[in-house]
Image (cartoon, rainbow, N blue to C red):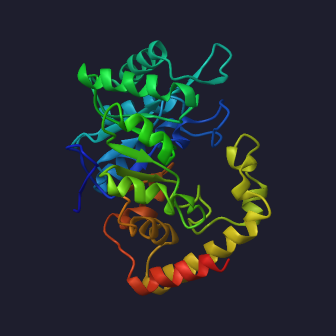
Amino acid sequence: MEKRTLGNSDLNITPIGIGAWAIGGAGWAFSWSNQDDRTSVRAIHAALDAGINWIDTAAVYGLGHSEEVVASAIATYPGPKPYVFTKCERAWDANRQIIKVLKKDSIRKECEDSLRRLSVETIDLYQIHWPEPDEDIEEGWSTLVELKKEGKVRWIGVSNFNEVQLARIAAIAPITSLQPPYSMIRREIESEILPYVQSRGIGVLAYSPMGSGLLAGNMTRDRISHLPEDDWRRRSAQFQEPLLTRNLRIAEKVGEVARRVGRTSGEVAIAWTLKNPAVTAAIVGIRTPEQVAGIAGALEFRLAASDASELDQFVANC
């Protein structure tokens, strides 16, 4: 199976990885509503069985719960252990309110808490989740550099940084990876950020390649209108007008191409993201074993140039 080296690291990862946002469950500001932990574990096992060799989570997903579920899945998996990536900077207070902090003491505590929840001695990739507060990104990045030197984390990267912020922290220490949103419905990183990281050898882990489910092939207006009240997507601009009509049109086109090439919509959407040479791999969220069956083909499926061009032209005209 194809593996790709992530940036300047020795991490050889599969083209898609397991996204563990939704398995954090309900009870926090950006939840995907209720999620059964046993189903989450079975989903992770199914993805590992399919050959995926890395999991991306974050401390804030479920306010620590996603990391605990990931640990449970790894502990009960009989095969090779996957790489585990997680993130810091989004912490929470005693009232379960999310706070944004990049101070040294906080990040050190967050790292120790993640090591404990994940039941690992070293985190394979530790990432700053958001560049907030902006004035503290140098302090935050310097702390990650220290954690790497101490062996608590193997490699360090960031998520949601722009090119100016990347340049600021690159002056302190090399950046292994950037994690940005990237899909047919969110292409804003193509003009400046992707060229920047590609020219500097920074790996890219694209998240939400299926547009948080919009391009998965089963999203409709009716389904969106019945999303649970605590599903964060109800508040997302991509799931509301004026963007919703455009996004559903793109989803229809993805489905058309998928039927023609004998693939699922999800596989086509992921393959479109992976066709960009700056993208190392894509993070694909899963919640059930059945969902794994609909995306596993993206480990090897690649879009023909003609199909990719057809999709690009359609999206450009939407």
Is residue 54 visible to us here? yes
Quick check: 69 above or below 207?
above
For residue 117, side relative to residue 214 (left or right): left
For residue 282, side relative to residue 162 (left or right): left
Q: Quadrant of residue 184?
A: bottom right
Which x, y percent locates residue 42? Answer: 41, 45
| Quarter of the figure with the C terminus | bottom right
The total of numbered circles placed on residues is 0
Which x, y percent locates residue 8? Answer: 24, 45
Which x, y percent locates residue 256? Answer: 56, 83
Is residue 16 visible to us here? no
Quick check: 187 above or below 201?
below
Quick check: 28 above or below 9?
above
Q: Quadrant of residue 109?
A: top left
Foreground residue among 305 and 292: 305
Quick check: 47 above or below 168?
below
Residue at figure coordinates x 64%, y 34% from the top left: 26
Residue at figure coordinates x 55%, y 43% from the top left: 22
Which x, y percent locates residue 121? Answer: 26, 22
Foreground residue among 190 and 244: 190
| Quarter of the figure with the N terminus | bottom left
Residue at figure coordinates x 31%, y 53% from the top left: 52
Foreground residue among 266 and 163: 163
Q: Quadrant of residue 144?
A: top left
